[in-house]
Image: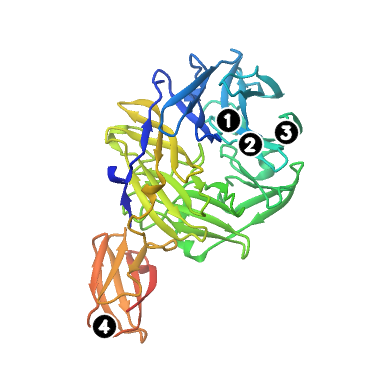
Amino acid sequence: MSSVLMSQDLEHSWCLFPDYSDDVLTFANLIETDDGNYIVSMYNYHNYCKSKEDATIIEFNSDGVIINEIDIDIDDDYILNDIVLDVWNDTVNVFMHCIGADRNCVKMLHSHLLSDFTMTEFREIWSADFKEPMTANIISCKPPLIDANGFRTISYTYSSWVIPGGYPYYGKVIFLKLDPNCNVIVEKWIDCEELNYDHLSTVCYTFNEDSTQYNVMCGLNDNPWHCQYVLDESFNIIDTVLYERESEMNYWGFFKPALYSQNPNDGVIYGICSLGHPEAKHEISVVKLDKTDMKVKFLQCTDTPDDIYNQIGLGNYLCYSQNGDIYGMGMYDFDDFSQDPINYECKLYIVKFDENLNKLNEWYYEIEEKYLHYFDHIYCTESDDIIVTGVVSKDYQLFPCIVKFPASAFVNIEEAHAHGLKLAVAYPNPGGDVMNIRTGLRNATLSVYDMQGRKVHEQEITDDVTSIDASKWNSGTYIWKLGIRNEELGMKCVETGKWVK
């Protein structure tokens, strides 16, 4: 059902720890160059603390060797909030988003990264003053959307700067459109109340199929997972689209808003999030916005009975290969309510699925037991290798880290059972003399019925996998039900399915 990425799977893989441990550094976004190298920006993000150099851009090759680096410093009157990279016509563009030290203003700077790894002088392409102190997402890490003609779209979310616990907050979103020369040609502010969303959430925005409109997903106050705003080319709201959720979600609730992104192969919007069940633990789920029947479709990623959380809000947790496979990333055994590394594990989880939400496999990975993993970006390279970036923690210290997995690590491993959002699954299906039930539930009762409604089997569930002797059953279709006893409601069925012998 799942695999642990072992050393024999990871030939040609590597971990890169840039030697910048004096500051709390993290990576923004990564780009791949035509010659097969990678360029990534990183900077200090801890509580907006300024570091010796505000940011560093490094270039490393396919073997994980740093071949170039350059430091960036900014005006002391400003604090670096975000730095992102993109490529257009073989030119690497660098965008820096800076907040005033008093948080009463903001500006955007642009530079070109030249082939000799020097930079042109930064020029200011946009600025704004705030009527009251504001702050932005600590790490937005969203590279600009670029259409076929080289026009870019950039967005940031701002909220009022108040003492923690001091309410009410106030928030708004800025959308900027840039021409191919990186000059701002459209500026649009939208108040958070107009979007009816939690202003501390990260706004995700994508093009529609022909790049004439925008799809904006954000964390709504009441339903943080199924509302889509449609904006025209000038960022005016022209439609609000509400998706219905699949009936399978009746027992599930979202623990964190979905972090959405767009599949470049077909334009479909997917998201990844944490969800919970009243009778089970937290799991990671992938969501898909299906425009055909206006449904939000779901895939429960994890099969483990342990808590699996997704640390939403910093980077990109989904990536897309050219062959149609999709990869998602999460955290394994991450205790979201504890801040003491001694009391929890935090390892990397990767899931692979197709565009129809059929899960192909899942993997668990750790560099070493002594490190806790806080990866927040996942990338698929031109050769279908997988790169994750973020930080790892050891003895209460954070270190920037990049890990590259070869494409071969994600093939020819035991295929996972493809299923939707289920608390339990019966396999193999069709089967023979043995019916297996896999579930993370405990103290549950399994009941199996034939098509005439006669109960042919019943037992308590105590293990991850329960094997049932079906050798004496007649060939045909059977209905299985998984129930949990509730003191008020009695036995409540929480999952059911068909199994064919």
Which residue is labeled 3 in the image? 180
**Cα gap from disc 1 to disc 2, whole angstroms:** 8 Å
Q: Are marks 1 and 3 in contact (CB under 8 Å)?
A: no
Q: Are marks 4 and 2 in contact (CB under 8 Å)?
A: no
Q: Can residue 171 be seen in this view?
A: no
> Could you say whether the residue bearing mark 4 is in a helix, strand or loop?
loop
Task: Judge whether 478 appears above or below 283 on screen.
Answer: below
Which residue is labeled 4 in the image? 473
Task: Judge whether 122 appears above or below 159 on screen.
Answer: above
**Cα gap from disc 1 to disc 4, whole angstroms:** 61 Å
- Residue at 76 percent across and 44 percent down: it is 233
Q: Choose top left, top right, bottom left or bottom right for residue 130.
A: top right
Q: What residue type is labelled 4?
A: Trp
> Could you say whether the residue bearing mark 1 is in a helix, strand or loop?
strand
Which residue is labeled 2 in the image? 144
**Cα gap from disc 4 to disc 2, whole angstroms:** 59 Å
